[in-house]
Amino acid sequence: MDLSTPSDASPLGSTRGYQGPYIHQLPQEILIIIFHLYIDRWSSGQDLTRLRLVCHAWRATVDSTPSLWTPIRGAHGMQHVRNAIAYTGESPIDLIPSSGDPVSLDDFFMAVGGKIAYWRSVDLDFDVPPASYGGLQTSACRSLENLRMSWVSEGLPQATPLCLFDGGPAPATLKELSLFRIPVDLGAMQLSNLSKLELKDVPHLVTEDILLVLDNSPMLVTLGLQELGGLRVSDSIGGAPIHLGSLTTCTLDLPIPVIRFLLSTMHTPSLRRADLSCRLDGSIPASSLFSPSIAAFTPTLRRLVSPAKYVEIEFAFSGLCSIVFGGLEISLDTSGIDEYRSLRDVLDSLMSYTRANGAGLKAHLRLDAVEPDLENLQLFNCQPMVEELTVSVAFWSDLAPTKAVEALGTRIHNSPNSWLFPELEVIKYDLGDDFYDLLKTALEERYCEVPTAEAPSAATHQYPLSLKEIHFHWENSRGLRREGKEDLLKEVRRLAGNPKIFWRGVLVDSVPP
């Protein structure tokens, strides 16, 4: 439908009462909503210019609507910054400067300096330190609610901690603080009542600084503490409980003793997601994360892991491995030590926190660009039983879990289970053309003796359970084309006892190749 002005009549066939194009008949409130939907956050400067050039009425609407002019980005040039400052009036503004912008950080902070009292948020990425951080270093920045600062280059922007807000307390309005590799005098800021705190690789921080902020922020919702090398645990640090009743998400990437100390100190009855990461050097076992039990954290830990219907276990390149167990994720960097034994030990300690010690719990195991042998894999040939196995190889690595595929077809002697992963029902396979024969051989050896008259016993595992699904090059993988693979897929289906076959997420029988 043409919404422009008709040459001789209105859409109703008469010029009587015609008020112009439909778009101009919209209430201004609706038009502003449409403008907001049209403006892309990454190209807001160009989008605003286009809107202002349509007609005088649109220009007036854009220029009189402060919310359309924020956030203010240096990426759109100095003229856009000046226009935004002029048209936002006394409304709150959000600032997103960056070192790579055509407007330098020093010029940007100078241009917006007159609006310090209205700064609502600052989101700063930089690799060249400015001469000054403008209003962030003054107490005039009294309306700031969100501050994010990220140093994205090598080294540090400065040797000594940055002094913000004239060296005094942060604004009482500040609710969210995120720092990445920026040395900041956290103690002087006297932070309190935060809802979000994220600190990553921030130098010069000590444990007492963190505890003080946590103790003064009982309404904290999100907490992230990662790679903070200055944190230590000692007898001189008080361990008084800190109640964080609103905390729902917690990310800790710290040494095991520091993680244990924080988990034992924080009382988090509302926690729904905990991501814990640590690097192992062999001096402290990975299982010591939760063993011996942390009394204060035990109820929360049980609540996090108990709802899980299956456990996700992943081994990746260069000693990286992880467990996702309900609302708990644990990532280990095990370079130089046995990652399979380390992760098994953590899994065993977690199983004790589940109902009936995890009876009936299943596992999804992913092997990506690693080479575990049968001995490594047998560590996971018990509860929780593996029901889904993913084997893949990264494009940048020559390592492939070929021994794991071979192991599927190898009978195991002197073991309660005669086969590896006897309850396996789903295989996801992304190893490329060179390894299809390997899979066919393993399937033939694994299922050639399974009785057909009756179902195998899951209690004794004398025989493996039948496969239900095999996925080749799942939907988002870099998988190969299916043309010419029909005979292969038919053979795989026959050897595996007629499971469903998927190619890049599509059931093979449902569409032609």
Image (cartoon, helix red, strand yellow):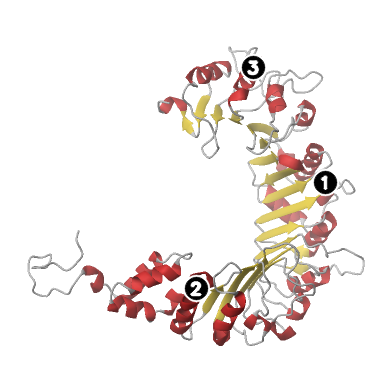
Crowd tier of the residue under label 1, counting other residues whose Cα lies within 10 Å: few below 14, some 14–19, many 20 or above: some
Q: What element carries label 2?
A: loop
**What amino acid is found at the position of numbered circle 3 in the picture?**
Thr
**What amino acid is found at the position of numbered circle 2 in the picture?**
Gly
Vertical relation: 504 (above or below) 52: above
Vertical relation: 312 (above or below) 41: above
Q: Is mark 1 on a helix, strand or loop?
A: helix
Crowd tier of the residue under label 2, counting other residues whose Cα lies within 10 Å: few below 14, some 14–19, many 20 or above: some
Q: What element carries label 3?
A: helix
Please report contact status of discs 1 and 3: CB closer than 8 Å, yes or no. Answer: no
> How far across and down, in percent of the image, does residue 212 sit?
78, 74
Q: In which quarter of the image is the C terminus?
A: top left
Question: Label 1: which residue?
Answer: 287
Say which of marks 1 and 3 sits in front: 3
Q: Residue at x 13, y 67 (%)?
A: 6
- Judging depth in this view, the residue of 63 and 239 nearest the camera is 63
Q: Quadrant of residue 339?
A: top right
> How far across and down, in percent of the image, does residue 282 sit?
88, 45
Question: Label 2: which residue?
Answer: 77
**What amino acid is found at the position of numbered circle 1 in the picture?**
Ser
Q: Which residue is drawn at 16% across and 69% down?
A: 5
Which of the two labelled residues, at mark 1 and mark 3, occupies the earlier sequence position? 1
Vertical relation: 488 (above or below) 323: above
